[in-house]
Image (tube, rainbow, N blue to C red):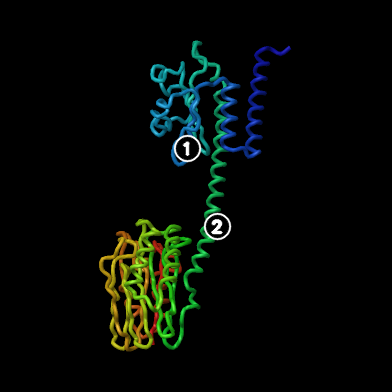
Amino acid sequence: MASNTAIKRLEQTTFKLRALLNITLAINENHTQEELLQHYIDLLHSDLNIGKLILFKRDESWKCIINMGYSNEFIDNIDVEKDLLKYDEISFDWKSNTESNLGTYDIVVPIQHKGIPIAFIIIGDVDEDSEGVSPIIKHLNFIQTLSNIIIVAIENIRLFNESLRQEAMRKELELASKMQSMLIPHQNSLPKNKRVYMTAFYQPHLEVGGDYYDYIELSKDEIGFCISDVSGKGISAALLMSNFQANLRALFSHEISLPALIEKLNERVINAANGEKFITLFIAKYNFKTRELEYINAGHNHPFLFRKDLNELVYLDKGCVGIGMLDEIPVIRKGSITIEGPAKLLCYTDGLVELMDGKGVSFGTGEIEECLMNAYPIQENIDRIISLQGIIEGSAKIFDDISILGLELY
């Protein structure tokens, strides 16, 4: 006949195996984090008679995800980094009885995964009236094992949900990128004829960007074009850019003057961005008959106009502050220049000239000017710039969207 000790040992072993099986089944049945924690609490409280327990888990920071029997003030006074990280095995000396007033012992049970602490359990002694070690201490290794299984399962749930979130975001960004590419004129849609050759290059730093360029035929003898850059990056910049594109297309016509257009665009951007973002913009009209170029530079990088017949480089910098910076733009200066001979015009966003180096952000237009001031076609000039800056290869110096718009006027 088996002894009472052997029977109790068998009962304890059976209980532990059944508990582990139930938890494993719950995990395999894809129970939620809340359901798994409730299984865990029920087992500790009902079956092991634990009434005082804290469970800290590390995500981005350490958080208390279970509190049984402790005051919020007590938990708030615990600094996991300072008080608990030093424990790599079950310990009984965390706080004295007079400090915690929670029983004979306060027990710290560290939970590690691949040698890295992922959770800590603090257990208050169950049998506070008895002398010596509480019977619960016999189950500490089992509690540690059970807790490890639960915490790793919860972490896997978090990582899985995070991967789903990232995949959904990736698909949304992919769709946004496709939609944005539809808003920006394709290279093949730009005019290439005996009067003007227009070409462009666009590369967002992220999946979507805040750069934008456009071309509009205003009449049979006049074209309009622009290049712009929304402050910031990512989805919010792309959304404002798409809103700006819609407004520009609706407002830009042969009849409207550039200063009036700027005022209307500023009003629309203020309403759309609530003052949180702004847009730098270079916008122009060119008349093939009069050969007059009218433009406004609203806080944008000044384009370069290279007049081949004069071997002269002109900066197009007359204008105003950026769109959306102020409720009302105080002064708008329109630039005007007559281009009598063949010329090349290069517009770009600041990603092309703001590069990271060892000292921070550097600004440089020297290479761009050098690439433009020659007899080569504008397309070759732009290809040369792209090659020198290492844009296609993904130079580590580049940290912003890059757009280039080039015109050759014959």
Relative side of 42 to 70, left or right: right
- Circle 2: residue type: Lys
- Position of the N terminus, as image quadrant, is top right
In front of the other: 121 or 161: 161
> Tag 2's secondary structure?
helix
Residue corresponding to mark 2: 171
- Position of the C terminus, as image quadrant, is bottom left
Is 130 located above or below residue 296 in the figure? above
Q: Give percent across and percent down for residue 197.
A: 43, 83
Q: How many marks?
A: 2
Residue corresponding to mark 1: 58
Outermost residue to the left: 331
State which tag comes first along the sequence, 2 or 1. 1
Q: Give percent across and percent down for residue 240.
A: 42, 61
In front of the other: 44 or 10: 44
Q: Give percent across and percent down for residue 140.
A: 54, 24
Is 237 located above or below residue 139 in the figure? below
Is 146 located above or below residue 347 in the figure? above
